[in-house]
Amino acid sequence: MVPEPLDHRLFDCVQVNLAELADRLHGDGSHLALGRVLRFWPRPGADGLPTVEPQVDSQVAESADLLGLRVTRRARIAAAAELEPGPGCYAVADAYHLPWVPYHRKEHLQHSFLVEPDGDGVSVVDGYHNDTPWGAARPGRWTLGRAELAEALPEGALTYEITAADRPAERTPLVQLADAGTYVAAYADFPDRVRALRGLTLQTWLLTRSRRLHAAAMGTGTEAVRAHLAEWDALAKQVYLASRRVAAGREEPRSVFGRLADCLAADHTAFDATTVTPESTVDSEEVPPEVRESVSAVIRTVLGTGPAEGDRTLGDIPGFSSFRMMEIVERLESDLGVEFAAEDLVPEKLTHVDGLCRAVLDAGGSR
């Protein structure tokens, strides 16, 4: 069997560089062991909102066990001068200060990277892959001088020395799913709606990636599982759109919470190959040509190119992402003088030309 190449899109920003180390130490494909466990155990988070984001130490410890890695030293360093670069130097620091990620000077969050000696400076290796409101994060290697490294770690970092250990032989999936009712209600009923939707954006992103990783690790590529993962993808996009709308003072689409509950409930059966039937909300009914041209013109403006003749899906256009999707929606509303209904802000509609056209018409647009 040909080893699976590392798909960086499957991992969060703490996991991904442990996956990189596993493939270095045990060979290509070793990273998939990280997906054997699928867990939904929310813990108390900030402001009374629950979170599925694990604490760094516990995540590193469990990930190391799954990947056949051993943490030989853990240290909280106060400054970059205390860092000891090497082949197993794994660090976690505030992404706000890290110049190679889009979060630099934008957002505070814990982010991992590997640090190797490189002449008088260091090489930073970071496999993180994600699209953010401030640009794309992609896997790469960056050379930093000692002064630059000091600027990147003004508050120090949590560091680990990691080596190879025996690889676990166990490949049986471990799925542990708690009841989701309290979790969903906490986000649905939280008084600060901007904060709730912003937090839920991260939550659904983490939940979606963990399910994709589990499916890849266990080889559960059935039609039912693919449909379930597609529903998680759509939910994550819808929550992001909802968060943007609420932050702008717009109406909140409450349907996201029922959809979240449905996705979490379906987890119990999807990974046992029970059939999941996704709903399609895209209306393929013909629309006036002038509306289609207005929509296509906005798509061309935002993406630099439009869909080919007869092509109704935007996902295959280079550069399309959740952020561009939101930009298309906002430009359509501005240019056409309409406001989309909150319940129309679902990816199944907004990633298709027909769906966008129908949303424009439903909002009263006719140009």
Image (cartoon, helix red, strand yellow):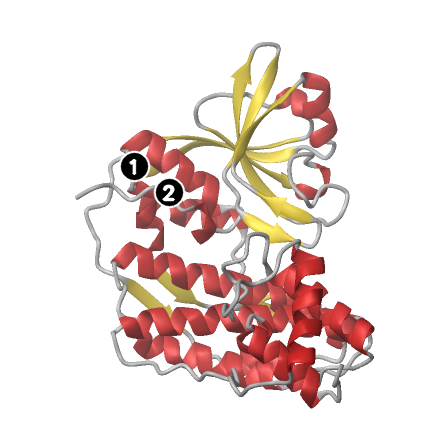
- Cα gap from disc 1 to disc 2, whole angstroms: 7 Å
* Amino acid type indicated by mark 1: Asp
Residue named by callout 2: 6
Q: Is residue 40 visible from the viewing direction of this image?
A: yes
Mark 1 falls on what kind of element?
Answer: loop
Q: Is residue 36 visible from the viewing direction of this image?
A: no
Residue 331 vertical position relative to residue 161 in the rendered view, above or below:
below
Mark 2 falls on what kind of element?
Answer: loop
* Amino acid type indicated by mark 2: Leu
Front residue of 356 and 147: 356
Q: Quadrant of residue 331?
A: bottom right
Image position of 239 (left or right of 206): right
Tags 1 and 2 touching, CB below 8 Å = yes
Mark 2 burial class by Cα count in 10 Å: few <14, some 14-19, many 20+: some
Residue 122 placement (x, y as % from top left) = 58, 19
Residue lying at 60% horizontally and 86% vertically, measured from the top left = 255
Front residue of 257 and 319: 319
